Image (cartoon, rainbow, N blue to C red):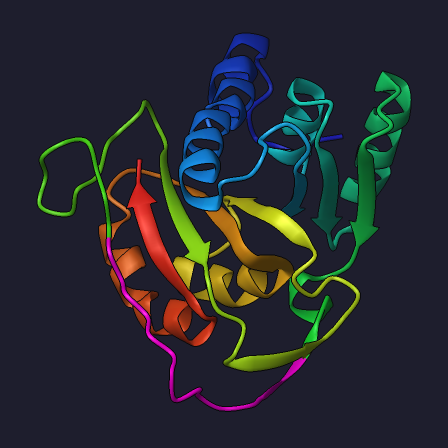
Amino acid sequence: MSLTAVNEVNEVMERHIEDSLAIIPPIQNSYISSCNNSFDNLRIVDVGSGAGLPGLVLAVACPGWEVTLVESMNKRCLFLEHAVSLIGLSNVQVVRERAEVLFQYSFYGFSNDLRLKIFVKGLEFDAFGALSMGNMHAVIVSAHCSTLLIWDSNFRERFDVAVARAVAEMKVLAEYCLPLVRVGGLFVAAKGHNPQDEVKSAERATKLMGASVLQLC
């Protein structure tokens, strides 16, 4: 269906399937350490799922997760629904909608007792504390406050983890994805090499969404 530019099987496995699976360890490590909850039964939303990368792959690899695939293009949604039916997955919901209209919001204002800390933890030794793994960096954002905005949506703060891969810049993704994450949940953005500038430019949006950068890995 020409959903990706990569068509050769081995390249698909490396660049798409393995890359999607590589998101699981950062989710597991960050969720267990930061959220103090079980990792086995998460509610996941994949924003801009495209060909199901990474959401469909995560649903297959982690059958205990409830995965919602959000995609705006009808052609891709038809593929996703076909793939879900063909595989026989019972833990996947396909939602045809643009991420920015999943919720409507109005600015409410700052709470006097609100305290936000922006920090990055890493295991390697570059200036930004980033740990590089293959072709991907994961930017993990912790949502720890809901006092900034009032959201009106069935999807508001519904998910434990939001993921996005090859969708938009971090400052845009913060506005798309963080409102969907419950307080104390995570947003994981799969990025290419050297995402430091993107992360820095997204600091204001991340703060306004009531979250902070937890780590790059």
**Where are the magenta residues, as a range?**
105-119
As drawn, 180 above or below 147: above
Left or right of residue 212, residue 50 in this image: right
In the drawing, does residue 163 fall left or right of residue 193?
right
Q: Position of residue 4 (x, y in %)?
A: 61, 32
Residue 169 in view of the camera: no
Q: Residue at x 48, y 45 (%)?
A: 35
Residue at 71 percent across and 62 percent down: it is 98
The image position of residue 84, as x and y in percent, is 84, 27
Residue 69 in percent (x, y) is at: 73, 43
Q: Residue furthest top?
A: 10
140 vs 85, left or right, is left
Q: Is residue 89 visible?
A: yes
Quadrant assignment for the N terminus = top right
| Residue 59 painted magenta | no
Q: Is residue 69 left or right of residue 107?
A: right
Q: Is residue 121 above or below residue 206?
A: above
**The C terminus, quarter of image:** top left
Q: Give the quadrant of residue 3.
A: top right
Asked if residue 115 is among those painted magenta in the image, a careful observer would answer yes
Of 12 and 207, the residue lying toward us: 207
All told, the count of numbered labels is 0
Q: Main secondary structure of the magenta part?
A: loop
